[in-house]
Structures are given as structure tokens and as C-alpha cells.
Amino acid sequence: MPPLQQITFEVRGEFITLDRLLKACGLAESGGRAKTMVAEGMVQVDGRDELRKTAKIRPGQVVSLHGARIKVVAESGGQEHKHGEGAA
């Protein structure tokens, strides 16, 4: 089994929607695919299944799906820079 991909994502502003987060981290190739992944029950937020495609994800929350775990943190600098793959 491949190791779990650990991603830290710096959110700019108060929150990011779940579908945008999945796309920005490179875990979904499109916004439509991200919404499908959520609708199919493939995504958990803080250990609970999340079926709202546009759920507001705030710093301190953890999003999990098969093979990946995203820790959402507050933006640390004045620049929009995201760690991990596929900055939006």
C-alpha cells in the first residue's frame, strides 16, 4: 500500500470550499470531478463523511480521502502560495 500523501494547504481568507480545495491540491483534475468525489462519499472532514460539495473548510480542519490527508492552515505570509501540488 502506498504511503499516505500528507498535504498542508494555506488558505487565503476565512475559508475555501471543499471542491476548490480538492482541485487546488491536485487531488481532483477538475471542479466537476471534485464535486463527484464528494457526492460519492469519498471525502471526510475532521473524520466525518462530508457530502456538501461547497462545505466551507477553515484553518484547523483536516480533509481526508483515499491516499491523502490535507491539513488546512491559515496563510502565513502576504503572498498567495500553496504547499503541495497544483496551486490554483
Image (tube, helix red, strand yellow):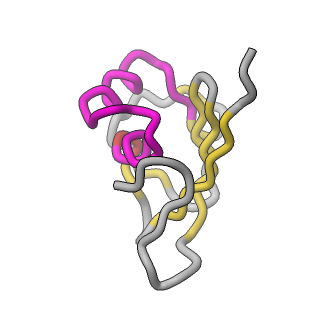
Q: Relative to 56, is 69 above or below?
A: above
Residue 84 lies, in percent from the top left, at: 55, 51
Magenta stretch holds residue 35: yes
Query: In the rendering, at what x and y percent does residue 71 appear?
Result: 63, 51
**Along the line of sight, which residue is nearer the eye, 35 or 9?**
9
Q: x, y percentage for residue 65? A: 57, 28
* For residue 44, above or below residue 80: above
**Is residue 63 found inside the magenta-colored segment of the image?**
no
Q: What residue is rendered at 57% in x and 61% in y? A: 59
Residue furthest to the left in view is: 32
User: Above or below — where is 46 with respect to 60?
Assistant: above
- Front residue (pair 49, 9): 9
Question: Residue at the spot x=62%, y=47% of the render?
Answer: 7
Q: Give the number of callouts.
A: 0
In the rendered image, which quarter contains the N terminus?
A: top right
| Left or right, residue 66 beside residue 26 | right
- The quarter in which the C terminus is drawn is bottom left
Residue 22 picture quarter: top left
Looking at the image, the residue that sits furthest to the bottom is 78
The residue at 43%/69% (across/down) is 12
Which residue is pictured at 40% across the width and 48% down the height?
Answer: 24
Instruction: Answer left or right for 10 relative to 1.
Output: left
Q: Position of residue 21 (x, y in %)?
A: 42, 47
Tell me the magenta residue range: 20-44
Instruction: Name the foreground residue: 88 vs 61.
Output: 88
- In the drawing, does residue 59 fall left or right of residue 12? right
